[in-house]
Image (cartoon, grey):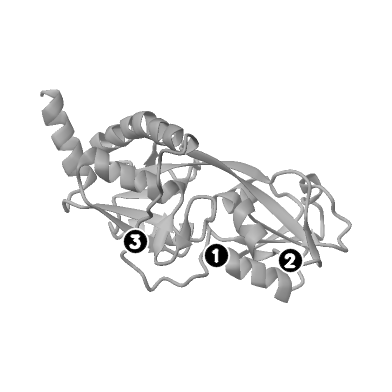
Amino acid sequence: MSAADKRSVALAELAPTGNIRVAMNVGNAATVSRRGDALVGPAPRLAAALGAWTCLPVSVIAYKSAGEVLKAAAGDAWDVAFLAVDAARSAFHFTPPYLSIQAIAVVRTSSPLHDVRELDAAGVRIASSAGAAYDLVLQRVLRNATRTAFEGPQASFAGFDAQGLDAVVGIRETVEKAFAGRADVRPLQGVVATIDHALATPVSRTHAAALLDDFVRTSWRALAGQAAGGEFRDEGLRPVTPAMEETGHD
């Protein structure tokens, strides 16, 4: 099979409908944010570049949480997703990472806790977002503290307040935005987890997976260089679900 034939097979596997359906978690402020009715940031920029690189149209499907992205995969709702890399997500092939982000913890100003290493103690109650990569980390490492999972980070922030929990964990950018201007909370020193983000596709799509790996290794590096040099203008992408609520989930 020629290189051109192999690429044709991979493209057909990547976009069986002729359109690359890209899933994005609009609540992860480190990867995507809103500018009017458009989505901008590293993930939308990379999705637009993928469309240009494959010469295929791209439809961005906005989801409220990583958990919703994963659930939608069962119904074959998307072809490519921007997700955090985690060994528990073995149903997907992940490309090399395009971004690493941090999960942090916030406590009340009056809390005796000062460092994330103090979180796993008896009696400490931690709010988290169900299905998020950092929630999977908490499930693996916590031995003494109690974890309470909510449906998305906004719900976890609300639960932290309403239930008087001791701490809440989330992506740094999302947490900082949610608690900006509040004098009654403060971040703990240290990082709960550093999480790689990558493009994901169902593990059964082996040809598409190889194509995506090649794309990330070649095109994302070039895009990042253009952005650093001020050459790239982020015009944004418009999601196919524009009615999505402004408050999203990690």
Disc 1 to disc 2, how far (Cα)?
A: 22 Å
Percent position (x, y) of residue 110?
88, 63
The answer to whether the residues at label 2 and label 3 have Cβ atoms under 8 Å apart is no
Is 133 left, or right, of 7 in this rendering?
right
The residue tagged 1 is 152
The mark lying in front, picked from 3 and 1, is 3
In this picture, residue 152 sits left or right of residue 181: left
Pointer 2 residue: 181
Badge 3 is on which residue? 238
Q: Residue at x 45, y 46 (%)?
A: 42
- Residue 1 bears which disc, if any? none
Q: Earlier in the sequence, mark 3 or mark 1?
A: 1
For this rendering, which residue is in front, 185 or 77?
185
In the rendered image of this protein, does residue 183 appear above or below residue 221? below
Tell me which amino acid carries mark 1: Gly
Instruction: Identify whether 78 is placed above or below 246.
Output: above
Visible in this render: residue 27?
yes
Mark 1 in CB contact with mark 2 (< 8 angstroms): no
Q: In percent of the image, x 39 and y 67: which residue is there?
A: 37
Residue density around tag 3, few if under 14, some if 14–19, many if 20 or more, within 10 Å: some
Q: Residue at x 43, y 54 (%)?
A: 40
Q: Position of residue 91 (x, y in %)?
A: 38, 45
- Judging from the image, what secondary structure is the residue with disc 1 in? loop
Q: Position of residue 131 (x, y in %)?
A: 52, 57
Q: Secondary structure at mark 3?
A: loop
Q: Which x, y percent locates residue 95?
A: 39, 36
